[in-house]
Amino acid sequence: MLAVGIVAEVFGPHGEDLPGFDFTLCTDRPGPVPTDLGVPLTIAHGLDRIASADLVIALPWAGFRTPPGPAVLDALSAAHERGSLVAAHCVGAFALAAAGLLDGRRATTHWRFAELLARRHPEVSVEPDALYIDEGTVLTGAGAAAGFDLCLHLLRREFGAAVANAVARDVVLPSHRDGGQAQYLAAPVPEDCNDERLAEVLAWAGANLHEPLPVAELARRALMSKRSFARRFTAATGTTPHAWLRSLRLSSAEELLETTDLPVEEIARRVGYGSAAVLREQFVRRRGVPPRSYRRSFTNTPNDPRAATN
């Protein structure tokens, strides 16, 4: 039920200013479907709805150790062959693997079952630590709340940072976490005054991206040594201060490119890069296109509904 709620929340209605989706749950056996909460979920639609979907997301199910029936596998394969995006949340990756859609590709799943996926499907390159992996037309995500990261990544990729950030704000989530970020933290951070300071420093950094923001300055504001700050930061966020700042700067640059007419030089200054050339280098390396090409991709993009089917 958590997976259903996550996908329905992201692709559900968020007001007239954001894209609308034709969201549908479907199954090979329409009717009451048992859930892990003990409350059955009535699903009215069969697999025929997949035939018209732009996006198909395979959700986790208790019997994932047994491959789905031929009808499900055929529907997933046909959707991919037709050009639909096909994704999987958590152990939904086992369905994509059984359909052959992960052969020769990188994939992830819930860390607890990553070894099983790799053993069952040696032709798949399983990365157990990733939050999500984007292989173009096929995407896989880790378990539980990482479903939010996968869905927000899809929104960001297809509709841009402004839309993804708006939806994230609506559901009170971080706007973006890199797919390579760790799935889980080995040692949860105690809720003490240092954590409050860390949260305050992160908020301050987000509001002052135009500053250089060296780690030494962030550590000073957190009243920690540079080494302690870096260690505590990684424990709390699953990534390094440099990687976190880079992701935040690029995400902010994306939103400015989409929603303003500011020159690239001014955007570079606002997000903390020394010049447009530095921003361009980072953008090409991390996003695959230069800033101006990215801006053209999201200029006058219509907010027409797209079908999103699970």
Image: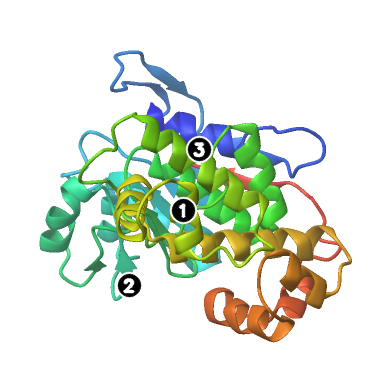
Whether residue 24 is visible here, answered yes or no, is no
Q: Which circle marks residue 7 in the picture?
A: 3
Residue that appears at 39% across and 36% down: 195
Q: Quadrant of residue 83?
A: bottom right
Please state, as top left, top right, bottom left or bottom right, where the N terminus lies in the image: top left
The mark that comes first in sequence, 1 or 2, is 2
Q: How was this image coloured? A: rainbow
Q: Residue at x 35, y 57 (%)?
A: 230
Residue drawn at the location 23% of the way across and 33% of the way down: 62
Query: Distance of mark 3 from mark 1, alpha carbons?
Result: 40 Å
Is 287 in front, or is 190?
Answer: 190
**Mark closer to the observer (1, 2):** 1
Between the C-alphas of marks 1 and 2, the distance is: 43 Å
The alpha-carbon separation of the residues under discs 3 and 2 comes to 24 Å
In the picture, measured across the screen, residue 228 lies left or right of residue 81, that is: left
Which quadrant of the figure has residue 294? bottom right
Query: Which residue is rendered at x = 35% and y = 13% of the image?
Result: 39
Badge 3 amino acid:
Val
Residue wearing tag 2:
105
The answer to whether the residue labelled 3 contacts the one labelled 1, judged by CB atoms less than 8 Å apart, is no
Q: Nearer the viewer, residue 18 or 284?
A: 284
Which element type, helix, strand or loop, lies under badge 3?
helix
Front-most of residues 157 and 258: 258
User: Which residue is identified by label 1?
Assistant: 220
The answer to whether one can see residue 103 in this image is yes
Upstream in the sequence, badge 3 or badge 2? 3
Q: Position of residue 252 (x, y in %)?
A: 67, 59
Q: Nearer the viewer, mark 3 or mark 1?
A: 1
| Quarter assignment of residue 20 | top right
